[in-house]
């Protein structure tokens, strides 16, 4: 049983004043404000406590900005900016690479490779997970993300239930609009993932921002 079986008190952290947003992401405090407001809404009104707490899709956001946001959120909520797992989804663009996210058995008896996504969260459930350029991932990756976002957990390659309900999941994409993302990526699970996103910030000529309930 991992530490994710105990609940993290989000509301206590969220009582901080708005000046916190400047500390989380000094260059773009408005982005930090939007993210915190989303997490605050989830913490105060949701009836389902199992879902992943923060579910974000950021478009046209540089890797540097995304990493600064992830680090700032980890420092603010978990008092440790090291509580961040960063994965570039180009490394999971082939079908045979997808299993690395949740772990898989090796060729030898009792040989096991820990999941790049699940193992860090198993050992440290209170964390920020950053998935960069999700449009480069193989479509099967979306199938893995559905239970994480909807149920707040997934069974890894060792048969352990890894709980993400005390984590913040940030996905970035260089695709401008949601409809473009759906057209380019052919996956029956993509729409399910997009419907579970709490904040979608997709930039374009008008720097469009939308909140998906």
Image (tube, grey):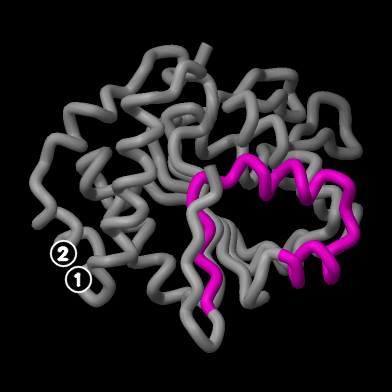
Q: Residue 91 in the image: x percent, y percent?
A: 73, 64
- Determine the secondary structure under disc 1: loop
Q: Residue 122 in the image: x percent, y percent?
A: 53, 29
Residue at 55% over, 49% down: 212
Residue at 19% over, 35% down: 13
Q: Is residue 180 magenta?
A: yes
In the image, which disc is placed on residue 26? Answer: 1
Q: Residues within 10 Å of mark 1 (few under 14, many from 20)?
A: some
Q: Is residue 103 magenta?
A: no
Residue at 62% over, 69% down: 173
Q: Are marks 2 and 1 in contact (CB under 8 Å)?
A: yes
Direction from residue 100 to residue 87 in the image, left or right: left
- Determine the secondary structure under disc 2: helix
Disc 2 marks which residue? 22
Residue at 52% over, 11% down: 1
Q: Residue 110 in the image: x percent, y percent?
A: 80, 25
Image position of 23 with respect to 208: above or below: above
Q: Which residue is nearer to you in this view: 63 or 212?
A: 212
* Range covered by the magenta-colored residues: 179-203
Q: Is residue 176 visible?
A: yes
Direction from residue 137 to residue 3 in the image, left or right: left
Direction from residue 95 to residue 20 in the image, left or right: left
**How far apart in space, not on screen, are marks 2 and 1 (Cα)?**
5 Å
């Amino acid at each position: 049983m991992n530490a994710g079986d105990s609940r993290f008190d989000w509301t206590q952290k969220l009582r901080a004043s708005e000046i916190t947003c400047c500390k989380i992401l000094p260059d773009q405090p408005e982005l930090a404000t939007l993210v915190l407001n989303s997490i605050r809404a989830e913490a105060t009104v949701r009836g389902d406590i199992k879902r992943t707490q923060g579910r974000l899709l950021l478009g046209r956001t540089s890797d540097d900005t995304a990493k600064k946001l992830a680090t700032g959120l980890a420092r603010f909520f978990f008092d440790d900016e090291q509580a961040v797992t960063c994965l570039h989804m180009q490394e999971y663009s082939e079908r045979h690479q997808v299993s690395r996210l949740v772990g898989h058995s090796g060729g030898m008896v009792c040989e096991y490779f820990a999941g790049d996504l699940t193992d860090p969260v198993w050992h440290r459930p209170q964390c920020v997970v950053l998935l960069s350029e999700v449009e480069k991932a193989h479509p099967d990756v979306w199938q893995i993300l559905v239970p994480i976002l909807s149920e707040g957990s997934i069974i890894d390659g060792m048969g352990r239930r890894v709980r993400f309900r005390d984590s913040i999941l940030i996905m970035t994409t260089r695709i401008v609009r949601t409809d473009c993302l759906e057209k380019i990526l052919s996956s029956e699970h993509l729409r399910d993932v997009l419907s579970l996103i709490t904040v979608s910030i997709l930039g374009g000529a008008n720097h469009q921002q939308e909140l998906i309930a």
